[in-house]
Image (cartoon, rainbow, N blue to C red):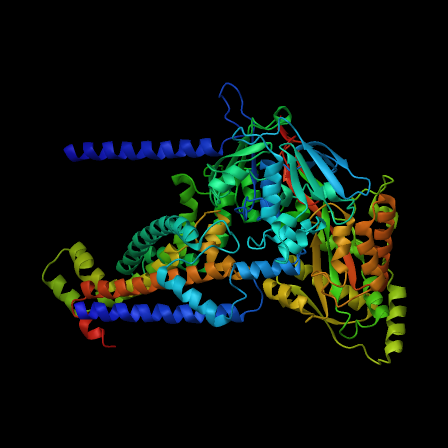
């Protein structure tokens, strides 16, 4: 009897523990914000997919870092809802007549999250740190438009010769090597964000933990459990704090998109990407949100390997594609077919769209393709087309695309290509050595200007990887960088794009798109085409 | 015994050294480097700076020297992919989480596996046997990632009983433990059953019965002890594999363990992390195998460690 009594107490205790555990779990996973807390907190729950590479602004040169850094920090300019750069840390600026010297006047109320003032010196410190060759920051090359920057970063010049200076606490002056039409846009890239010099000198690893992170943007880090969760809180010191509606942003780090989607379904996340297998069913969802992404997928021809030494054969391959089918059936997530290299969404000086104004530079025309193939083979004196292998980095999406292209080439051109899949890192390395013949390529913009796309195919560019070289093209790109007249600059870029697609060292396939699901109560989350997420205006209703 | 331990320890060190060297050679013989990107541009100068920063521009022999030093001091330096953290940070953060999940998994797999196996053997060709073995076959043939996804869909999305993923409360642990333990449970159940069947027919069991011992005592004290030898054999490898994290289950449930570093470090060519995880895992595995040997001698007094040491 006595023993039974003891047992039941233990059983009761065990039940209580279980119950408690269940309750805490429910609280953690409950709806957005603490309901019943009196005043409702606005909490947005997002998934970053993984731990950010680094929250040191120039160190995390990828989208998983940018989405966070862009909300924690702010540069001289910030992109608005229409993806145009607007005054941010800088209240206004002067540009010299030759377009080379920019003088930025920082806001008086520009503050760090620790209450200190954001000064011109913070920018000087951050930019020189970014360019320091010993730090080896990947985006340093973006700053080569600044006088002395390339020399310093290549180890040939001195830090003191980089033409940036703090005229006084709130005045920051930059001298460029040439007038750079997209400079204000470039400044929105996190690589150009300031760093609190004092905090960084006291603790060189200031960006590694929540406690030491000093931010100047709409949010600050409230807590950070590495690899697990990062919680941002509204930054009351932010100059435009009144605009910020959210109290808190919880970032999960869930790598698996199926899990992410299941968490979205069970109400643990407010926003989710779309698992590849569910894409077709979810395309009609009312919670689907799509936004332009500045990037495209294409194939590179190795112009030094037969048969792609011949321009007509390259064109024949490019024209044998059915790009509408690629976008609609192979990709199936509502993307645009690409008949040019620069994506939609870049505004020209006249207010038009770069892509629309420069038109379709490659047609889907199987008849013409066959003709060109025959002509090309005649020119080379080939009775039979040399064997062609299409190579891509191993993953399911690439495989589907490659199989689609294979069947289009077979149906429309009568050419049988072999497919070859290669582990991704090997693929990246070997394509720079021009090992492959015909291979998959993709490009995502670093900053919002067409030149970022087109400069990839200059002779010297590390992204060229085709062996293609055209003097006139190189000159147009170089000249566009020194042109201060925006209209002329865009004309040059359009001209360059025409040359690129006339000689066809690459064949564009489709433009990318940001596609995700978002709960209806979430409003005004902006995803910029270049890949920074903007939560400054985000709200929960 | 002491001599055996010392010998064994020296062999362990030598093995780790060989594994480490082979990892180094293999790692550097695959093409690709940590900084190649497909989607973004970069410049020559930046590449050179990066190579210099991580000593990748030094001759292979120097890199090997640097690496041996890091091995001896057990300081693998910063990860290349997550430069703000050192490999030791990653391991010391990820391992306790993987180990916690792993401990529960092993405990549950052992308890339920042995119970099922013993029951099945005792009721040989009976209803319980068939049920237990059907479960075991299912457990072995359904991959854990399918089970995991099914569990999330049913228990979290449809019934909303448990949180779908992440790692913060005991409730979060239930599904990953079930998903992870099912396979080992099935293996242990089958092993226990077959060796139990064998043991039960042996003469000393008959003797025990003849002596009039209670069935429970026969099973637990006499039969199980010998029947568990094969289970102990696989346990060393199993524990090492599960405690150091499993890539798939940790990924599906977004558990911040160390499983992902094994796979991702290789994809990313994150050399310091590849080295750190490989050495850690092999050291752990070798240590577990050593423990298994000791457990053998406890379970079967006929096994003498010092004799085995010579082999």
Q: Is residue A438 above or below residue A528?
A: below
Looking at the rendered image, the quarter that the C terminus of chain B falls into is bottom left
For the point 43% across and 45% down, the residue is: B175
Q: Nearer the viewer, residue B50 or A354?
A: B50
> Along the horizontal axis of the image, is A3 left or right of A281?
left
Residue B213 in percent (x, y) is at 12, 58
The answer, for residue A459, to whether it is visible in the render is yes
Check the image and name the residue furthest to the left. B211
Residue A186 in percent (x, y) is at 71, 44
- Which quadrant of the structure image shows residue B167? top left
Residue A109 in percent (x, y) is at 62, 26
How many discs appear? 0
Q: Is residue A205 above or below residue A367?
A: above
For the point 79% across and 71% down, the residue is: A308
Q: Is residue A227 above or below residue B201?
A: above
For the point 49% across and 49% down, the residue is: B84
> Along the horizontal axis of the image, is A454 left or right of B66?
right
Q: Nearer the viewer, residue B286 or B208?
A: B286
The answer, for residue A528, to whether it is visible in the render is no
- Which quadrant of the structure image shows residue B17? bottom left
Looking at the rendered image, the quarter that the N terminus of chain B falls into is bottom left
Q: Nearer the viewer, residue A426 or A252?
A: A426
Check the image and name the residue furthest to the top. A38
Residue B160 in percent (x, y) is at 49, 37
């Amino acid at each position: 009897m006595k023993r039974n009594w003891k047992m039941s107490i233990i059983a009761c205790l065990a039940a209580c523990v279980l119950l408690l555990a269940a309750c805490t779990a429910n609280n953690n996973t409950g709806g957005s914000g603490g309901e019943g807390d009196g005043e409702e907190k606005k909490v947005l729950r997002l998934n970053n997919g993984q731990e950010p590479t680094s929250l040191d602004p120039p160190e995390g040169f990828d989208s998983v870092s940018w989405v966070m850094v862009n909300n924690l920090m702010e540069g001289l300019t910030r992109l608005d809802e229409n993806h145009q750069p607007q005054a941010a840390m800088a209240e206004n600026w002067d540009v010299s007549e030759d377009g080379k010297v920019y003088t930025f006047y920082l806001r008086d109320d520009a503050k760090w999250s620790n209450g200190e003032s954001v000064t011109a010196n913070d920018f000087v410190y951050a930019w020189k740190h970014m360019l320091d060759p010993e730090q080896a920051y990947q985006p340093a090359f973006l700053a080569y438009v600044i006088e002395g920057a390339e020399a310093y970063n290549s180890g040939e010049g001195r830090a003191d010769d980089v033409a940036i200076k703090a005229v006084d606490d709130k005045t920051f002056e930059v001298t460029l090597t040439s007038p750079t039409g997209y400079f204000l846009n470039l400044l929105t890239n996190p690589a150009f964000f300031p760093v609190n010099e004092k905090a960084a000198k006291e603790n060189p690893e200031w960006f590694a933990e929540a406690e030491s992170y000093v931010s100047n943007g709409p949010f600050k880090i409230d807590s950070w459990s590495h690899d697990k969760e990062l919680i941002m809180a509204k930054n009351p010191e932010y100059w435009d704090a009144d605009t910020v509606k959210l109290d808190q942003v919880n970032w999960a780090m869930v790598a698996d998109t199926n899990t992410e989607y299941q968490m979205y379904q069970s109400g643990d996340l407010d926003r989710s990407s779309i698992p590849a297998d569910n894409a077709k069913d979810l395309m009609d969802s009312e919670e689907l949100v799509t936004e332009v992404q500045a990037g495209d997928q294409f194939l590179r021809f190795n112009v030094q390997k037969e048969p792609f030494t011949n321009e007509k054969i390259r064109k024949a391959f490019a024209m044998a594609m059915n790009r509408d089918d690629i976008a609609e059936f192979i990709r199936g997530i509502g993307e645009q077919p690409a008949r040019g290299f620069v994506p939609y969404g870049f505004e020209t000086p006249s207010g038009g769209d770069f892509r629309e104004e420069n038109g379709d530079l490659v047609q889907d025309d199987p008849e013409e393709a066959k003709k060109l193939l025959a002509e090309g083979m005649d020119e080379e004196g080939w009775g039979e087309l040399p064997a062609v292998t299409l190579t891509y980095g191993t993953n399911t999406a690439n495989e589907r695309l490659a199989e689609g292209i294979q069947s289009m080439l077979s149906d429309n051109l009568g050419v049988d290509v072999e497919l070859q899949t290669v582990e991704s890192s090997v693929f990246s390395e070997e394509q720079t050595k021009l090992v492959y013949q015909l291979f998959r390529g993709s490009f995502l913009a670093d900053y919002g200007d067409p030149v970022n796309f087109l400069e990839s195919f200059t002779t010297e560019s590390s992204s060229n990887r085709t062996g293609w070289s055209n003097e006139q093209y190189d000159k147009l790109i170089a000249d566009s960088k020194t042109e201060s007249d925006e209209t002329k600059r865009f004309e040059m870029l359009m001209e360059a794009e025409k040359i690129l697609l006339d000689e066809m060292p690459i064949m564009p396939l489709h433009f990318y798109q940001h596609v995700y699901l978002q709960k209806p109560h979430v409003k005004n989350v902006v995803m910029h085409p270049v890949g920074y997420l903007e939560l400054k205006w985000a709200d929960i209703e | 015994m002491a001599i055996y331990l010392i010998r064994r320890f020296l062999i362990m060190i030598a093995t780790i050294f060989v594994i480490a060297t082979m990892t180094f050679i293999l790692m550097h013989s695959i093409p690709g480097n940590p900084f190649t990107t497909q989607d973004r541009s970069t410049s020559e100068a930046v590449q050179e700076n990066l190579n210099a920063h991580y000593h990748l521009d030094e001759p292979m022999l120097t890199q090997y020297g640097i690496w041996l030093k890091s091995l001896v001091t057990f300081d693998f330096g910063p990860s290349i992919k997550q430069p703000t953290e050192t490999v030791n940070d990653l391991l010391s953060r990820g391992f306790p989480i993987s180990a916690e999940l792993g401990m529960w998994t092993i405990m549950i797999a052992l308890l339920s596996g042995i119970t099922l196996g013993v029951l099945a053997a005792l009721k040989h060709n009976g209803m319980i046997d068939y049920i237990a073995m059907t479960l075991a076959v299912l457990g072995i043939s359904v991959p854990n990632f399918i089970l995991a996804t099914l569990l999330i869909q049913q228990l979290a999305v449809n019934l909303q009983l448990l949180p779908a993923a992440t790692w913060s409360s005991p409730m979060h642990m239930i599904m990953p433990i079930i998903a992870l333990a099912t396979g080992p449970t099935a293996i242990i159940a089958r092993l226990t059953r077959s060796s139990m069947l064998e043991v039960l027919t042996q003469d000393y069991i008959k003797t025990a019965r003849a002596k009039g011992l209670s069935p429970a005592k026969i099973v637990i004290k006499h039969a199980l002890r010998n029947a568990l030898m094969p289970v102990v054999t696989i346990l060393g490898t199993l524990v090492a594999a599960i405690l150091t994290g499993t890539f798939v289950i940790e990924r599906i449930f977004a558990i911040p363990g160390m499983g992902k570093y094994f796979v991702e470090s290789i994809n990313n060519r994150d050399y310091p992390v590849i080295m750190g995880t490989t050495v850690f895992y092999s050291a752990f595995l070798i240590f577990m195998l050593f423990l298994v040997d000791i457990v053998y001698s406890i379970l079967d007094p006929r096994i003498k460690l010092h004799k085995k040491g010579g082999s």
